[in-house]
Image (tube, coloured by chain):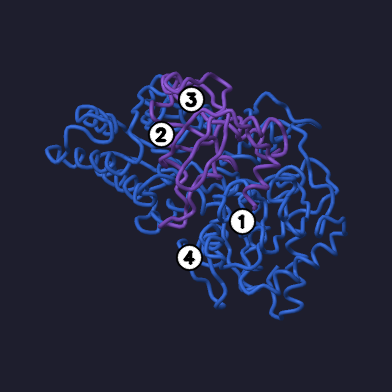
Chain colours: A purple, B blue
Amino acid sequence: MEFTLVTARTMEQGMFVEDKLSEDYFKATACCEMNPEDMNALGLKDGDRVRVTTQYGSVVLYVKRSVLDVPRGVVMIPLGIYANRILPSESGTGTPIYKNVRCRVEKTDEEVLSIEEIVREVVG
Amino acid sequence: MKVSCPFCGNVCDDINFDGEVEREKLCPLGESKLTREKKRIPYPMVEGERVSYDEAIERAVEILLNAKRPLLYGWASTVNEAIRLGVILAEKVGGVYDTTSSVCHGPSILATIEEGLPGGTLGQAKNRADVVVFWGCNPAEAHPRHPTRYSVMVKGFLVEGRRLRKTVVVDIRKTATALLSSKFYMIKPNSDFAILTALRSIINGNDSAVPNEVGGLSKSQLREFAELLLSAKYGVIFFGMGATHTRGQDRNVEALIKLVQTLNRHTRYILQPMRGHFNVTGADAVACWEAGYGYAIDFSRGYPRFNPTEFSAVQLLRRRDCDAMLVVGSDPVAHFPFDVVRHMAKIPVIQIDPHYNLTTKVANVVIPSAISGIEAEGTVYRMDGVPVRLKKFRESEFWSDYEILKAMLERVVERKGGDVVW
């Protein structure tokens, strides 16, 4: 299914941003939030894994039912290396577009990369 | 004694310290910053090997002097005194100075250059504002004490708290801040510019030019919103990445500024960007008073040139246009789009930071520093530009950012000539 990807600061991402090798930071950033109806449509429940793909790349994340109200058609990923794995760097202002990027979301059984693994993948 | 919290742009300055930090006034972010044990960089390193501060600084200086165009990036989590030395260092080595603004409120700075900022202080917002708008920002999670100290529940001299204050949230999703507000407008992604323009049209009396629906809001909702804005005796619009990270970027912020200018023909309004890191405002302001520009400044021709599309860190790395990088108090490996991080891994990287982070993994020279505002003192600018003096209230074996940068700059000046007014 096609979605609009937004990144955002979350309380947990902020709390552990200076402790990036911790399990807490991994949990806070290797995830995405979706509208419960979209999750039902994709056969997803809390804690399932999804592959989120943009034209720039692809990443596997845990999915969370939106606590408040991420609208239908939107997937929200906390700021961090997992979100940045699939975001573009080109920009007319010098500041990358970190929000409102088209993406595809599909259920997967693949593992979520650990922080160490995603750094290795990103660094190449 | 009172100490300040060096985490977000609120720089809350009412934290009690009596040998230990009193948790009562801390938000979850402040509690994590001031009380959580984190993995520190234990000692200076060159290529992963333990060295002395002297050796690490020597290697860092060699890298900067041997580079054709080094990038000196970060600066939002240190104090103004250190930032000043960083700007001078960039000039001396003919490099590029850039701050974390270039991945957050850079577009707001561009818009401010075009239009000016109808700004005020958080104190004015607290004491006067009877209409408070949060546009594309979520202080409940990013600046948790903002609502209680400055904007929603707080009692001001002229506005006695929440009951007399109308709070409006404009966002593409129902954020935690939306739950605090008296009115929430959920808009469609990428529609900020269109909605801001429609609001200006209505306020200017050109209602007939506005279509029946703009960005997910009906014309009657837009009219109601415009009336609510005009009902203020004193209004404030806070805005965040919802404006700068979406289509339009600086144009969205220009539209916000123009909306505030328009509202000021009828009543009083101010605009305030919700700056993230505790001294990202200082990182820009200090560069402004040293070099005339706030971020994305190239010194390779011996004089400052400003062009974010060319000299911002992400764009410079994207074009592989820098051949060394100094990172101070930031983590670009975690926060830059992945394709530019790949270039970082190919060039020598020097890191100055208290904490082990993802940039440490690619850094060739790692220099641990004292935590600004906890283990090192200095001045910072709160998000509204108000200076706050940060105290040192914990001893540390680590050098401060200022001491490290001073030692680097002294060696650069020794080898390249010239002098510095310390």
What residue do we see at 80% from left, 54% from top?
A: B399
Left or right: residue B336 compared with residue A68 = right
Which circle's residue, 1 or 4, is located before the other in the chain? 4
- Mark 1 → mark 4, Cα distance in angstroms: 18 Å
To which residue does mark 2 refer? A3
What residue do we see at 79% from left, 47% from top?
A: B41
- Mark 2 → mark 1, Cα distance in angstroms: 27 Å
To which residue does mark 1 refer? B342
Residue B213 drawn at (x, y percent): 21, 32
Which label sits in the foreground, 1 or 4? 1
- Mark 4 → mark 2, Cα distance in angstroms: 31 Å
Tag 3 subunit? B
Quadrant for residue A85, please give it. top right
Q: Amino acid at mark 1?
A: Arg
Which label sits in the foreground, 3 or 2? 2
- Mark 3 → mark 1, Cα distance in angstroms: 35 Å
**Above or below: residue B48 compared with residue B292:** above
Q: Amino acid at mark 4?
A: Glu
Categorize mark 2 by other alpha carbons within 10 Å: few (<14), some (14-19), many (20+).
many
To which residue does mark 4 refer? B310
